[in-house]
Amino acid sequence: KRPARVAPAPDRDETEPAGAAGNDDPSAAGYEPEWAWLVPHRPDFLVLDFTHVQGLNETAAALLQKFARVCTSHSIRMVFAAIGPNDVTLLHAHGQGAAFRIFQNTRDAVEFCE
């Protein structure tokens, strides 16, 4: 059997104003794709809670710093909560070009973000 043929969709009426229903032109004024509600709002902060973390090694600290730099490049502030003093030293040793904040506990970190 041959698949059924589907007629092509009719073109938009040229008398329709820009931004009218059915207009898929991204350059049109007031254009918003119908799937726009699916795209989440970019966060301002990312809180990482280290309450249950035993410790960091060099590789983990380097990767966290790399991630912090990516967050910084996207205007997202990385916040570390409940991280041990040795781990803070390790993060600072790898921290070139990354902006992050460190708090003693998660409550203070979340309060900072609010």
Image (spheres, rainbow, N blue to C red):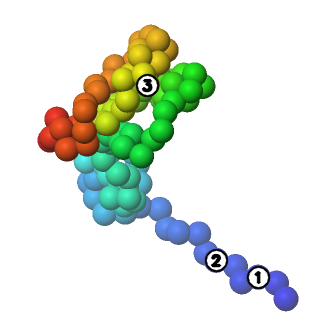
| Nearer to us in this view, 18 or 103 | 103
Residue pointed to by mark 3: 87
Callout 3 crowding tier (Cα within 10 Å): few <14, some 14–19, many ≥20: some
Residue behind mark 1: 3
Q: Amino acid under label 1?
A: Pro
- Residue 49: x and y in percent read 35, 42
| Secondary structure at numbered mark 2 | loop
Tell me the mark number nearer the camera, choosing from 3 and 2.
Answer: 3
For the N terminus, the image quarter is bottom right
Quarter-of-image position of residue 58 = top right
On the rendered image, what quadrant is the C terminus found in?
A: top left
Judge left or right: residue 71 versus residue 9.
left
Tag 3 secondary structure: helix
Across and down, in percent, residue 6 comes to 64, 77
| Quarter of the image where one finds residue 5 | bottom right
Task: Pick whichever of labels 3 and 2 is earlier in the sequence.
Answer: 2
Cβ atoms at labels 2 and 1 below 8 Å apart: no
Residue at mark 2: 6
Eye-nearest disc, 3 or 1: 3
Q: CA distance from mark 3 to mark 1?
A: 63 Å
Q: Secondary structure at mark 1?
A: loop
Residue 104 quadrant: top left
Residue type indicated by callout 3: Asp
Rendered residue at 47%/18% (across/down): 90
Please tell me which residue is depicted at 45% across the width and 41% down the height of the picture.
53
Measure the C-alpha gap from mark 2 to mark 1. 9 Å
Q: Residues within 10 Å of mark 2 (few under 14, many from 20)?
A: few
